[in-house]
Image (cartoon, helix red, strand yellow):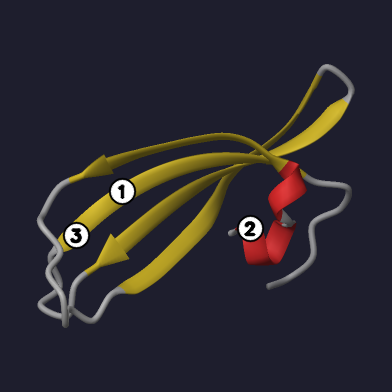
Amino acid sequence: ASDWLGPDNVRRVRCRWREPVFPGDVLTLSGSVARLAEDGGERLADLDLVCTRQDGAVAVVGWATFRVDEMEDA
C-alpha cells in the first residue's frame, strides 16, 4: 500500500496475525479501498489488507489509513 500511496501519506496502521508464517511460505498480499472520507482537511482512504499463505490460509489481516490527493486506478 505504501508503494502505491506513498510512505509519507500513512496516517494509521493496524494488523492482526491469524496464522503463523514460516520461512519458505509463499505469501500473497491484497487489498481494497474500504472508504474515502475527509477529516481535518485531509482526504483519506481506509484500506482493508489481507496476507494469505500458499495454502489459502489468511495469515494476517490489516487496516490502514492513507492521505490521498486523488485516487487513481492501481
Near-viewer residue (3 or 33) = 3
Say which residue label 3 marks. 58
What residue lies at 42% left-to-right and 53% top-to-bottom?
A: 49
- Horizontal side of 16 relative to 14 (left or right) equals left
Q: Amino acid at mark 3?
A: Val
Say which residue label 1 marks. 61
Do the numbered discs 1 and 3 sit on residues whose CB atoms are within 8 Å? yes
Q: CA distance from mark 1 to mark 3?
A: 7 Å
**Horizontal and vertical percent for residue 44?**
73, 36
Answer above or below: position of 22 versus 69.
below
The N terminus - image quarter:
bottom right
Near-viewer residue (50 or 6) = 6
Query: Please, what secondary structure does the residue beneath circle 3 have?
Result: strand
Do the numbered discs 3 and 2 sit on residues whose CB atoms are within 8 Å? no
Q: Amino acid at mark 1?
A: Val
Say which residue label 2 marks. 2
**Horizontal and vertical percent for residue 20?**
10, 57
**Horizontal and vertical percent for residue 64?**
53, 41
